[in-house]
Image (cartoon, grey):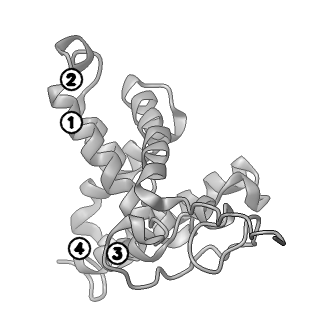
Amino acid sequence: MTSPGKGPIAFLQLVGKLKHVRRSGWIRSGVGPGRAPGEVVPRFTPSPPTSGHLGSQRIESVSDHMHRMSVMALLMAWAPSSAQALVDRDKCIRMALVHDIAESIAGDITPHDGVSNEDKHQLELDALITLGNSLGEEYQDAFSEILSLWNEYEAGESPEAILVKDLDKLEMLYAIPLGCIATPPPPAPGPR
């Protein structure tokens, strides 16, 4: 039996925080109302309420990012058969779903935060262990799969990890025309 305060609900409450972890790179780039390029960004910055349309200058959350990546992996079912044979599509979907899950606790750490790759990895691994502990004993098989997928993604050596890392970059590029990056205002008119 799962201990009080542990189990799927406790886990999902922690993972649900991803909806409120905004992508630090967008904030640092001056995306969103009242932000300036290069502004120091706290790791956890609540997203303001929006209509849900990215064109409204709302800053993409980590949850938004992970969802779109997972849908991109799902679309591989309709890729040419030669591409399908190279990777396990379902594994790619699961990997995309968990690749940034530790950010629900660790926050969205970017290279601009001055955190070494080793320290970032350890912070995220510690966060994953906290997530795993929140599940309780009954769900440790599920946590083992999450941890295994995350470690495989981090290593970046399997065909699936390489593809999901490419989807990570592609998703960021895809977000640009959706309005996640603010268009700079036009220059002020000069004297006539």
Residue 3 occupies quadrant:
bottom left
Instruction: State the residue at coordinates (37%, 62%).
Output: 64
* Residue wearing tag 4: 8
Task: Judge the density around disc 2: few (<14), some (14-19), many (≥20) Cα neighbours within 10 Å.
Answer: few
Q: CA distance from mark 2 to mark 1?
A: 7 Å
Q: How many marks?
A: 4
Side of 158 relative to 40 (left or right): left
Q: First in sequence: mark 4 or mark 1?
A: 4
User: Of the residues shown, which amino acid type is indicated by label 2?
Assistant: Ala
Mark in the foreground, 4 or 1: 1
Viewed as shown, does residue 125 lie left or right of 37? left
Q: CA distance from mark 2 to mark 3?
A: 31 Å
Q: Earlier in the sequence, mark 2 or mark 3?
A: 3
Q: Amino acid at mark 3?
A: Gly
Question: Which badge, 4 or 2, is on the more N-terminal residue?
Answer: 4
Tell me, for residue 79, which label it has, or none: 2
Classify 171 as above or below 22: above
**x then y, percent, for residue 25:** 62, 59
How far apart are the two marked residues, 3 and 4, measured between alpha carbons? 12 Å
* Quarter of the rendering occupied by the N terminus: bottom left
Q: In the rendered image, which quarter contains the C terminus?
A: bottom right
Label annotation for residue 75? 1
Q: Are marks 4 and 1 in contact (CB under 8 Å)?
A: no
Q: Quickly name the residue at label 3.
A: 16
Q: CA distance from mark 3 to mark 1?
A: 25 Å
Point 52% across, 41% down: residue: 154
Compared with 143, 160 (above or below) is: above
Q: Position of residue 76 (x, y in %)?
A: 22, 30
The residue furthest top is 82
Viewer-closest of 88 and 40? 40
**Residue 116 visible to the viewer:** yes
Q: Residue at x 22, y 20 (%)?
A: 84
